[in-house]
Image (spheres, helix red, strand yellow):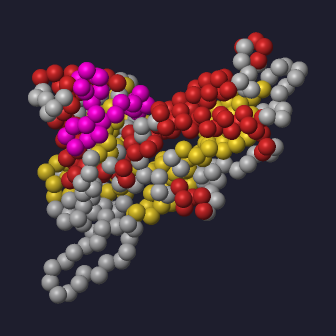
């Protein structure tokens, strides 16, 4: 087919236009690390460690308390994603040589691609962010609930700029409904109420997303009397909990431990609320006990990364945030600063027979669009779209989950 390359180019250009029109999360996150990955030629499936600078310690008096440079690290695994469709022109009545058909299918594949990017991004928030406000199973209609989440991010010394707030459709309904009795600075609130979408309030830029991650509760609701074992290792990400019932505790479950409080990231002074953790992987309760993998990692006053005022102690009460019913599904809306989470992408190589595909770039993500040769026997042609990306959390304390229904 003489014009195959032109067709794939049309598709890739339309794809990028569609992504710009439909994306919310991707343009609002950190993508600075993609350049490093491109330069070092990492391939899909590779897991790479990223350094995060530590916080220096300050001491009073003439004598310095010299500390080693101890950067924290986080890792990201690059994965390949694709969408491919088969086109039969006679049976379905369209052709990849028709610009209108090209735009139609580019739009459909763009929507699916961006949904997958955003779904995986919000899942990263769910499974790595411990800070949370609101109540599972209850739509967060009170603006104060969102403002409390913003306050936690500010306490963690996130930059003093407007944060992003991603709400699922029902949370957005609850938010805009709460505006009906509000005072009106100009016509801003009334316009938001008429549109049914909150845009900006309380230092947050709101947007609506159908891709918000949901957390499915485990199969146990018996958390009364749950107790922790002692943690004594800097950077520990595991917490043993006993005196449980039976069943499972799933990723995305939030918890606190008695007498383990959050601290100011710079001064290390104890804040007025408990440190909140999230379970990062599913765990099965065996013998009324389970070992939970949690985020963030725990650092005491002995570390320049200190984020708690004390390690968990034996028999400390563990409070697990749950809607109260086994296997319930609850939305985890999120407030975040741009640098809380990072999207990393690497370019795809030219495939064999490269004259039949083209490349487009959207927000630093390279997209490869390929059109297969026409199968004259089956009157069939394949259109395929590929992209490679991975998500990682840079500053988990610069984001906060807002529970919903």
In the displayed structure image, the side of residue 75 where residue 376 appears, left or right: right
Q: Residue at x 26, y 51 (%)?
A: 161
Give the quarter of the figure containing the N terminus: top right
Count up the numbered dots.
Answer: 0
Q: Residue at x 21, y 37 (%)?
A: 201
The percent coordinates of residue 345 (x first, y second) are 56, 50
- Residue 399 among magenta residues: no
The percent coordinates of residue 163 (x first, y second) are 29, 45
The percent coordinates of residue 59 (x first, y second) are 19, 77
In the displayed structure image, the side of residue 381 where residue 272 appears, left or right: left
Give the quarter of the figure containing the C terminus: top left
Residue toward you, 405 or 100? 100
- Residue 211 among magenta residues: yes
Farthest-out residue, top: 91
**Please, is residue 402 above or below residue 47 in the view?**
above
In the displayed structure image, the side of residue 245 where residue 87 appears, left or right: right
Residue toward you, 351 or 258? 351
**Please, is residue 364 above or below residue 195 in the view?**
below
Work out whether residue 276 can be spotted: no
Residue toward you, 314 or 161? 161
Work out whether residue 376 can be spotted: yes
The percent coordinates of residue 392 (x first, y second) are 46, 50
Q: Residue at x 28, y 33 (%)?
A: 199
Magenta highlight range? 191-219
Q: Residue at x 83, y 27 (%)?
A: 374
Residue toward you, 66 or 177? 177
């Amino acid at each position: 087919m003489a014009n195959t390359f032109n067709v794939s180019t049309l598709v890739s250009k339309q794809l990028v236009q569609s992504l710009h029109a439909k994306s919310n999360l991707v343009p609002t996150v950190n993508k600075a690390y993609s350049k490093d990955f491109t330069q070092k030629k990492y391939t899909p499936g590779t897991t790479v460690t990223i350094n995060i600078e530590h916080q220096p310690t300050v001491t009073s008096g003439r004598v310095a308390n010299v500390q080693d440079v101890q950067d924290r690290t986080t890792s990201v695994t690059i994965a390949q994603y694709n969408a491919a469709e088969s086109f039969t022109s006679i049976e379905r009545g369209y052709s990849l040589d028709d610009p209108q058909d090209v735009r139609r299918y580019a739009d459909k594949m763009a929507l699916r691609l961006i949904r997958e990017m955003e779904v995986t991004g919000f899942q990263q928030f769910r499974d790595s962010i411990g800070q949370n406000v609101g109540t599972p199973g209850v739509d967060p209609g009170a603006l104060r609930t969102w403002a409390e989440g913003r306050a936690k991010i500010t306490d963690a010394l996130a930059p003093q700029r407007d944060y992003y707030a991603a709400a699922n459709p029902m949370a957005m309904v609850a938010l805009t409904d709460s505006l009906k009795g509000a005072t009106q600075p100009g016509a801003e609130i009334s316009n938001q109420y008429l549109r049914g979408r909150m845009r900006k309030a309380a230092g947050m830029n709101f947007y609506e997303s159908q891709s918000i991650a949901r957390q499915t509760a485990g199969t146990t609701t018996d958390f009364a009397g749950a107790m922790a074992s002692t943690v004594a290792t800097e950077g520990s990400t595991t917490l043993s909990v006993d005196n449980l019932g039976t069943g499972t505790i799933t990723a995305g479950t939030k918890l606190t431990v008695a007498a383990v409080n959050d601290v100011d990231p710079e001064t290390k002074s104890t804040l007025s609320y408990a440190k909140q953790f999230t379970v990062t992987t599913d765990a099965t309760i065996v013998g009324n006990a389970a070992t939970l993998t949690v985020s963030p990692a725990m650092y005491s006053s002995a570390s320049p990364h200190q984020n708690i005022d004390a390690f968990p102690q034996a028999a400390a009460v563990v409070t697990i945030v749950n809607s109260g019913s086994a296997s319930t599904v609850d939305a985890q809306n999120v407030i975040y600063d741009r640098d809380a989470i990072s999207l990393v992408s690497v370019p795809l190589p030219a495939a064999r027979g490269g004259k039949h595909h083209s490349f487009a770039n959207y927000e630093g993500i390279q997209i490869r669009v390929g059109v297969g040769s026409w199968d004259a026997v089956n009157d069939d042609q394949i259109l395929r779209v590929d992209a490679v990306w991975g998500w990682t959390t840079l500053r988990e304390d610069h984001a906060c989950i807002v529970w919903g229904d």
